[in-house]
Image (cartoon, grey):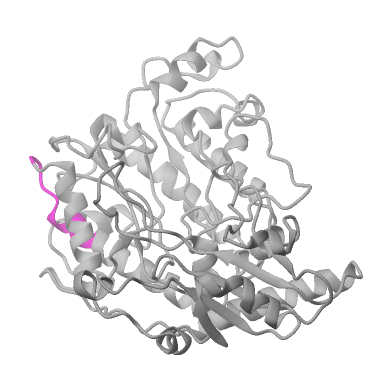
Amino acid sequence: MASSSSSSSLSPPGVPMELHVTNREKLLSSLRHDLSHSSRPLHGFVFLQGGDEQTRHDTDHIELFRQESFFAYLFGVREPGFYGAIDIATGNSILFAPRLPSDYAVWLGEIKPLSHFKERYMVSMVYYTDEITGVLHDQFQGSGKPLLFLLHGLNTDSNNYAKPAEFEGVDKFEKDLTTLHPILTECRVLKSDKELALIQFANDISSEAHVEVMRKTRVGMKEYQLESMFLHHTYMYGGCRHCSYTCICATGENSSVLHYGHAAAPNDRALEDGDMALLDMGAEYHFYGSDITCSFPVNGKFTSDQLLIYNAVLDAHDAVISTMKPGVNWVDMHLLAEKIILESLKKGCIIVGNVDDMMAERLGAVFMPHGLGHFLGIDTHDPGGYLKGLERQKEPGLRSLRTVRELQEGMVITVEPGCYFIDALLLPAMESSNTSRFFNQEHVTASGCKNMTKCPRKIWEIEAVMAGEPWPLDKTL
């Protein structure tokens, strides 16, 4: 991997559009199976609307476009304003491109012919969006109005609903708003080898960028300078124009703010000697993302308090990783992480008492209020965490879990236990009659941290890299 100079051992891989062909075939097979199982005819169209460009409020400033995720999964189209259809009877895939005005060529570049999109996106045919009604009626092989399977369903992370396609002439079709969403969502849960390769690259370039940031971090810098170094490295060497989410570059007390880095808390604190940094940043490559968190002391050396909390989280992380396999339930992994963190805090005399009693009182949720991890793919919080019939748990901590499923081969899921010291949670717990007995009231002062990364993790690895050693380290020395 890269030496201490600003360079990279990586280069952006080619993106095979066969990936999206495979995704469409997977959906078609699942949908046909579902229709056959319920004795429904195998005709109609899967029909999706891609994303549209958005302007900044009432101005003409166009925000950088990123494709709607379900549309990206099936078609891989990077341009805005498209629609897509899959003919259930024939398996044909159809893209509908916007008919661009002639002055597009003046301001925004060449107006590509339809043949360009047919070849680039490996679809059966391409038409303009103002031809949707006529084309689908011509292609339909059933009787009566053609049936459209539209995307409408709940995202259990955001509690927002996927928006079904809208177009002029939609009233000339029968519509099914319930069948497609759960089937397409489940297709996204289990990744193909081509999907895994893109996710791996996004993680590789992000890991390399985290190491670069770690190596260059100095007391006196601003948090946004760490963010800037990460963004530069992943774009310069990885071709990653987008991030999977807003960068979290938290130091000192900011490290206990779970989603720090937003517009009202914009990574703008100066790094002080003795601070821990918590950097949660991940690049996106051809829609597929990464999610990596690194925690380290900004001066390059851990204090005893920092060691205690860091190793509590690292031990929980390693225990989960070593236990995970198909068939294991994710709730059990969350509870395992909680228990190991509580055991570590007890050894460090931060809390006292019986750990099983602490678990029964949900004390773990005071230090780890978030879920252990989440599905990762085209979205940072990839959908599919709650199949029909699976209920979100009500208890603290467990209600934050983004999935309660059993693990299956092909799932991509993050493992990111945490140990946070958040006054809004600690103070009520220290005063509660149920949990106050567990606290050593004189010791609950240290800043917590979390770790989920392919970057340096062991204490000696972090301190060596921050002292200038190349990464990965030569472990024979």
Q: Is 25 or 78 nearer to us in this picture?
A: 78
Say which residue appears at 49% left-offset and 35% top-offset.
368
Looking at the image, which is closer to me, 58 or 134?
134
Image vertical order of residue 325 relative to residue 57, above or below: below
Residue 318 in view here: yes
Question: Going 48% across and 60% down the picture, which residue do you hit?
Answer: 68
Residue 383 % position (x, y): 58, 55
Question: How many tags in the picture?
Answer: 0
Q: Position of residue 95 (x, y in %)?
A: 53, 77
Q: Quadrant of the N terminus?
A: bottom left
Specify whether 305 is left or right of 119.
left
The answer to which image quadrant residue 86 occupies is: bottom right
Residue 464 visible? The answer is no
Q: Can you say whether 220 is above or below 458 in the image? A: above
> Magenta stretch containing residue 179, yes or no?
no
Asked if residue 177 lies left or right of residue 299, the reply is right
Q: Residue furthest left?
A: 220
Magenta highlight: main SS = helix
Looking at the image, residue 401 lies above or below residue 347: below
Indicate the position of residue 59 as horizontal and vertical percent values. 25, 45
User: Is 349 above or below relative to 86?
Assistant: above
Residue at x-position 65% and y-position 81%: 25
Residue stretch in magenta? 211-220
Q: Nearer the viewer, residue 323 or 9?
A: 9
Q: Position of residue 253 (x, y in %)?
A: 27, 29
Q: Along the line of sight, which residue is nearer the eye, 391 or 67?
A: 67
